Amino acid sequence: MDTRWSRRSLIQAVGATAITSATAAAPVLGAPDPRRVPRGGWDAIVVGAGTAGLPLAIFAAQRKAKVLLLDIADTTGGTLHVSTGQMSAAGTRLQQARGISDTAQEHYDDLQRISRGTIDPMLARLAVFNAADTFDWLMARGFEPLPGQPVNGEAHEPYSKPRYYWAAEGGRAIMKLLQREVQAPVERGLVSILLKHDVFELLHARDGRVRGLRARDDTGTLREFTGRSVVLATGGYTAAPALYQRLTGRPQYINMPYRHSQGRGIELGLAAGARLRGIENYMANYGLVLASDDQPTSLFARPQDFPQRRQPWEIHVNAEGRRFVREDIPSVDAREQSLLYQTQGRRWIVFDQAILDAAPPVLQGFTPEDIRGAFDLHPWFKRADSIGELARAAGIDPAGLESTVTMFNYGVRTGNDPLGRQHHPLPIAKPPFYSIKTQATSVTSAAGLAVDESLRVLHEDGSVIPGLYAAGELLGAGALQGKAFSGGMMVTPSLTFGRLLGSRLLPT
Ligand SMILES: Cc1cc2nc3c(=O)[nH]c(=O)nc-3n(C[C@H](O)[C@H](O)[C@H](O)COP(=O)(O)OP(=O)(O)OC[C@H]3O[C@@H](n4cnc5c(N)ncnc54)[C@H](O)[C@@H]3O)c2cc1C
C-alpha cells in the first residue's frame, strides 16, 4: 500500500465537511415522501443513478425488486454525459453477424497481456465473461454502434480481435437508452428516483449490517432511507482535486471528468471499514496541450501521436531536455508508460522551421495556420532563434536539450538514432525553433473499493461488510485495467456490474 496516505487522513480529507454538517443538522431529519416508500420497504437503495446505477434498477425491476435511486445531480446518467462511451465485449451477436470469432477468454487474455498481469483476475473475469450479454441487450434496445464496428482500437493498446464499439453520440447514446428503459419501471412504481440528494452517511444495524443511509436534499433537509441492501455506485474521484492529489500524489490537471465524480463512495466505504486498493496502478495518457496552467483546466489540443496515423517528425523531450521514448514506437502503452516516469509527467514536442513547413499538422484537427497562430497566443507554445533560448523560454534544461538535438541530428544523418527511431526525415537545424508543452492527464480513478465476486464490499481484513455492495468506477480502474488503459474497460464493466447486481446478485 502507498504510504503517502492513511485511512484516517483520507477519511478526514474527503469526509470532514459532510459529516460535520450532518451532525450539526441532525435534528431536522425529514422523512421521505411516504407515497414513494413501497410496501415492505426498498429491496435496494442505490447511491448514484449513472452508468452502473441505471441498469441495476432496470434489471432489478424485472425481478419485481423495489429500488430507490438517489443522485446528487439534477439529472440521471452520471459520467455518460461526458464519456466517450467506448465499450468492449467479446462473443457478441454483432461480432457473429460480422463473421468475427471471439471469446470472453480471449478478451481476458488480452487484458492480462496489455496490463502485464496487473488486473484483478476475479473482477476482470466477472466483467468480460458477462460483457456480451450487456452489449447484446443494449443492441436489442436500439443501441447503434458506428458503421464498420467492432474494431480492434487504436487510442489504447489494440485488442487482438475487433471487439470495441461506440456510438456517434458517445456516452450520451448509452445514457439516453438507459433513461428510456428506466421509465417503465418508474411508472410501475418499482423504481423511484430522487435527484438532488447528496448521500453522505451510511446507517448500520447493531450487528454492523448496512441498513440504510442519510442524504441531504438541495434545500438542506436531511433524510433517512432504509432497505435490505445499499449499493454504492457514485463513480470515481477525478473531479475532486484534493482527493486526487492525496491518492495519486499528482494534481488533477484536467477538468473533463463529470463534476459529481467527487469520491463520495470512497468516503462512505472507508467510513464503513472498507478496503481501498489499486492506487499503484495509476495511469495517465501520453500528454495533452491544456488551456492554461490552472489546475484543473480544460483541453486545448490533442497531439497527433499515433505513428499509425502520422509518423513523427519532431522529437519529444522531458524537463531535462532528454528524449525518453522512440517517438515512432507503435505501442501506445509504451509511450504512456514512458511518460509516467518523467518529471511531472511533462513532455515537450520540439521542432524547427523546416519541419513546421513540411510535416502534416502535429495537433489533431489543427491546420498549419492554426498551429502557427497558437505560438502568438498560448503560453505552452514557444518559439526562439536558438535551441538554448527555446529551452529557457519553455522551462526545459538548456544543456540537456542542446545535446539531445545534436544527437538526434546525428541519428538523422547516419540512420543510427540512439533510441532506434526509424522515421526522421529532417534534422532540427533551421531557426526559428519551436516547442509545445504537453501534460499527462487521467480521467479515471485508479483506486477503488475491494469487493468479492458478488460485488459485496470487503473490510480491510477481507471479510464482507454485510448489506453493502459497490459497482462502477468506484471499484477502481486499477482493478479492471491494471496499470494500463484497455479500451472500453470502464463503461462496459460499470453497465455489466449494474446489470448483474440487478438481475441476480442482490438479494430480494
Ligand atoms: C471524458 C471521459 C471519457 C471517458 N471515456 C470512456 C470510454 O470511452 N470508455 C470507457 O470504458 N470509459 C470511459 N470513461 C470512464 C467511464 O465513463 C466511467 O468510468 C463510467 O461511466 C463510470 O460509471 P459509474 O456508474 O461508476 O459512475 P457515474 O456514471 O458517474 O455515476 C455515478 C453517479 O453517482 C452520483 N453521485 C456521486 N456522488 C453522490 C452522492 N454523494 N450522493 C448521490 N449521488 C452521487 C453522480 O451524480 C452520478 O450520477 C470516460 C470518462 C471520462 C471522464
Image (cartoon, rainbow, N blue to C red):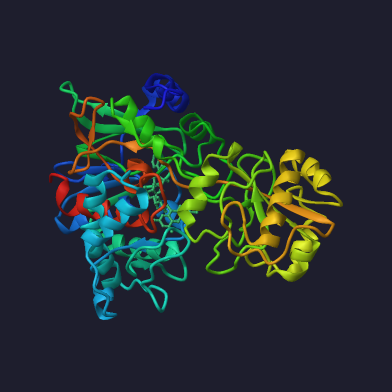
Q: Position of residue 44 (x, y in %)?
A: 22, 43
Which residue occupies 62% across, 50% down? 298
Quadrant in which the N terminus is drawn: top left
Q: Is residue 87 above or below residue 204?
A: below
Which residue occupies 47% across, 68% down? 169
Q: Position of residue 154 (x, y in %)?
A: 46, 64
Q: Nearer the viewer, residue 253 or 408?
A: 408
Which residue occupies 24% across, 64% down? 132
Quarter residue 229 falls in: top left
In the image: residue 67, left or right of residue 175: left
Q: Position of residue 496 (x, y in %)?
A: 26, 55
Q: Is residue 88 above or below residue 74?
A: below
Q: Is residue 371 above or below residue 57?
A: below
Number of numbered discs overlaid on the protein picture: 0
Q: Is any part of residue 54 visible from this angle? A: no
Quarter residue 343 falls in: top right
Quarter residue 120 falls in: top left
In the image: residue 168, left or right of residue 50: right
Which residue occupies 40% across, 62% down? 158
Q: Nearer the viewer, residue 258 or 478?
A: 478
Q: Is residue 194 above or below residue 463?
A: below
Instruction: Residue lying at the far front in this picture: please name it.
Output: 414
Instruction: Residue lying at the far right in this picture: please name it.
Output: 385
Q: Is any part of residue 126 visible from this angle? A: yes
Q: Position of residue 417 (x, y in %)?
A: 62, 56
In the image: residue 27, left or right of residue 379: left
